[in-house]
Amino acid sequence: MSDKTIRSNSEVVLIGAGIMSATLGVILKELQPDIKIEIYERLDVAAAESSDAWNNAGTGHSAFCELNYTPEKADGSIDPKKAISIAESFEISRQFWSYLVEQKKVPSPDNFIKSVPHMSFVWGEKNVEYLKKRFEALQNNPIFSQMEFSSDFEQLNKWMPLVMEGRDANEKLAATHMEIGTDVNFGALTRSMFNYLATLDGVSLHFNHEVKKLKQRQDKSWRIKITDLATGDVRKAYTKFVFIGAGGGSLPLLEKANVPEGDGYGGFPVSGQWLKCTNPEVIAKHQAKVYGKASVGAPPMSVPHIDTRVIDGEKALLFGPFAGFSTRFLKNGSYLDLPLSIKPNNLIPMLSAGYHNIPLTKYLIEQVRQSPKDRMKALREYLPTARSKDWKLERAGQRVQVIKKDENGGGVLEFGTEVISTHDGSLAVLLGASPGASTAVGIMVDLISRCFANQVKTPEWQSKMKTMIPSYGQTLNDKPELLAELRKHTSEVLRLKNS
């Protein structure tokens, strides 16, 4: 019987057609135009999971409004380090997206990014005090210099009239406001980048293809077994470098790769739902992304916010997300994803992480048990005049929080994104969730410095990096003039407000 296996060779294989793979693919082709790249996606379209517009908040995460990035320390002071780091990363993304628009590699920026103010909103004396301290800790940094704070009822009403409707003027309230915030349709951006990649020589995209096995060969290259889900055909891809950017599907693929760097990693899936406004008059009254404080034990993706979105040219209004629990690792995954991910090398870290995160377990149980009445009660904390008939429940995306070994051999639950790469630089895997897509460019630039360490040091690659990302190799928070210059330029190219 003849062997009908299809075989291919490339320098790079990207698994998963989301924002991460799209970003890495485009950057690598810019750095080395003759590089051969193969992309494999289990679903029939790009950006159908975490990158899809309805599966994430669409916030251009720049730490302008997300309170979980500025924790309060034991002495009562605010730690701004993570917020500054995320804000720096988003500036890198803006520069790269501007380059793609200027070079006509993606269509008009109107298709994927819009100016929408970012706000933090709290109530109660203790929370107002926290927000004031946060404002003071951030606003003296150039990257946050345009932030405004107010506890004045009239000013808050100007910033967010729908949120203030029906409130007592004597209530203790406060908000911060950043006019230069953005709403990003990461699904549209991802598909635009893949459309561009598809036009290039040496790039092949394969949808409806599922990776079944990964094995490293003696020469450190990889053999990947893939099944065409439409025809059943089997393909074997041979490559020097593999990137796994499959969202919640990354952990099972890391386990299949069987590399020591993946030892002890596990995942905890968290699902989400939105309340979506169906009344155009209500939608028209709100023009901001308003973030509040998370409940005790809540994962970062579950920070409540009332969100202006622009999706496919239509303005929308969402509230949530409401967290839930599912054993699936992907929205289109299997209920066996979690049980099948438990292996001897990650059992103890997963049990340990579960034991040390009882508040999270309790929070998720409470969220799963919520009735429509409970969800409307949560919404009315942000919109006191909200009517049930104007809102409907929509399923959002699935996220997998990272569990990994701690220094004591137990396990710790990580909130955020993490890149794991092998010591030889031949495999890299992205795990985790927020801020994810917003900082994709910075994450992929760091990945390239690890996995293409020799090439990235060459004058040619250095020059191309600086063409795509003018601030490459520099920080901006300590260079206010350069920051102002780049923000002005990217605002003009992306058609965004700059003040």
Image (cartoon, rainbow, N blue to C red):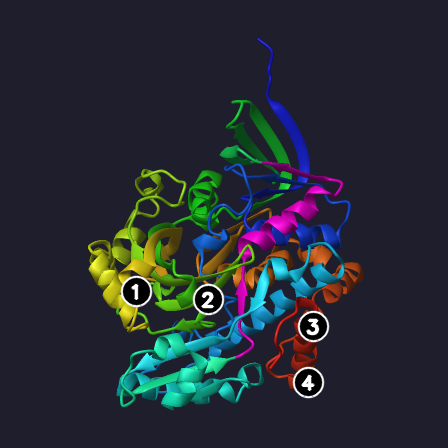
Q: Which residue is mark 3?
A: 492
Q: Which residue is mark 1?
A: 298
Q: CA distance from mark 4 to mark 3?
A: 17 Å
Which circle's residue, 4 or 3, is located before the other in the chain? 4
Coordinates of residue 235 in the picture (x, y in percent): 58, 27
Q: Which quarter of the figure has residue 482?
A: bottom right
Residue at left offset 60%, top offset 17% = 4
SS assignment at label 4:
helix
Which stretch is magenta? 179-206
**Which tag is nearer the camera, tag 2 or tag 3?**
2
Instruction: Tell whether position 192 is magenta.
Output: yes
Q: CA distance from mark 2 to mark 3?
A: 22 Å
Which circle's residue, 1 or 3, is located before the other in the chain? 1
Q: Are marks 4 and 2 in contact (CB under 8 Å)?
A: no
Instruction: Tell whether position 118 is magenta.
Output: no
The kind of residue on which mark 1 rests is: Ala
Which circle's residue, 2 or 1, is located before the other in the chain? 1
Q: Which mark is residue 308?
A: 2
**Which tag is nearer the camera, tag 2 or tag 1?**
2
Q: Are marks 2 and 1 in contact (CB under 8 Å)?
A: no
Q: Which residue is mark 4?
A: 481
**Which tag is nearer the camera, tag 4 or tag 3?**
3
SS assignment at label 1:
loop
Quadrant housing the C terminus: bottom right
The kind of residue on which mark 2 rests is: Thr
